[in-house]
Amino acid sequence: MSYKDVKRGLPDRDTRVIAIINQKGGVGKSTTSVNLSAALGESNKKVLVIDFDPQGNSSSGYGIEKEGLENDIYDALLNNYPIEDLILPTCEPKVFVVPATIQLAGAEIELVSAMARESILKGIIDSVKDEFDYVFIDCPPSLGLLTINALVAADSLLIPIQCEFYALEGVTKLLESMKMVKGRLNPKLEVFGVLMTMYDSRTTLSKQVVEEVEGYFGKAVFKTVIPRSVKLSEAPSHGLPITMYSRTNKGSLAYIKLAKEVVRRG
């Protein structure tokens, strides 16, 4: 089924474009991209996931066989390939994915000489975003040109932060980049929310990290926290979001709860 055949949740609603971003790796960006989009899809929201990480974890998390792809987001970014022809359906009827492969890794260098290089992704997304309630950009763990493109294309940021020592390490640099882009290229850019991931209620450390992050970001921190869960780690290997792989798992319930909080924030 084409993405155009699926109606939006609220036709008159402005689309929210959210970059899921943290320059640190392993904090739950792709996990959140896949599972939050699935939970929103279940809530009758139409969602597009732009996999913008050369690792392609959001693509494989939805069971997309990257090896068999002839084209991906790289081709839209650098070869003017129509994004309409890249949007793929997923197991969740209201969620669609623009996939990424390792080919995207070369884009950082190739973008250097491109015209209006910081805003190419914005033009790509703007051409289709009105079809969706939410567009998520799963960003790479860096602050290079790919991430700058995501910051220019997005209206807001969702920042996953792992409950570990040095949780805020690097976040200051990310916020500096956000401030720079906001001042020069995208004045509407804001922090939509900060999400605590890999939370272990049995440890004092997790609780202390949450308190530290809440002290830094205040009300931007989501009330929902994402717990550590073996099932959450297993789900991508089955090409399924946690809501389909293990419906009653604590990770699944957390992302369903987070989706409701995201909708309430607008």
Image (cartoon, rainbow, N blue to C red):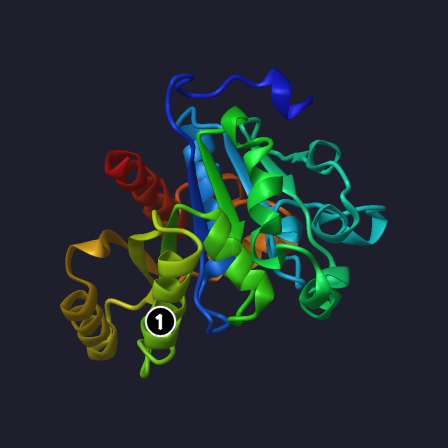
Q: Quadrant of the C terminus?
A: top left
Query: Height in image: 51 above or below 109?
Result: above
Name the amino acid type tagged 1. Answer: Glu
Quadrant in which residue 92 is drawn = top right
Question: Does dot 1 land on a helix, a strand or a loop?
Answer: helix
166 left or right of 231 in image: left
The image position of residue 235, as x and y in percent, is 56, 52
Whole-percent x, y for residue 162 in the image:
36, 70
Name the residue: 34% across, 47% down: 188
**Does residue 231 appear anywhere in the picture?**
no
x%, y% of residue 7? 52, 17
In this rendering, does residue 179 appear at all? yes
At x 57%, y 27%, the residue is 93
x, y percentage for residue 170? 38, 78
Residue identifier under label 1 = 176
Q: Does residue 170 appear left or right of residue 30 in this picture?
A: left
Residue farthest toward the bottom in the current orientation of the protein: 165
Q: Nearer the viewer, residue 150 or 48?
A: 150
Tell me the quarter of the picture where residue 208 sits. bottom left
- Is residue 17 depicted above or below 23 in this figure? above
| Quarter occupied by residue 265 | top left
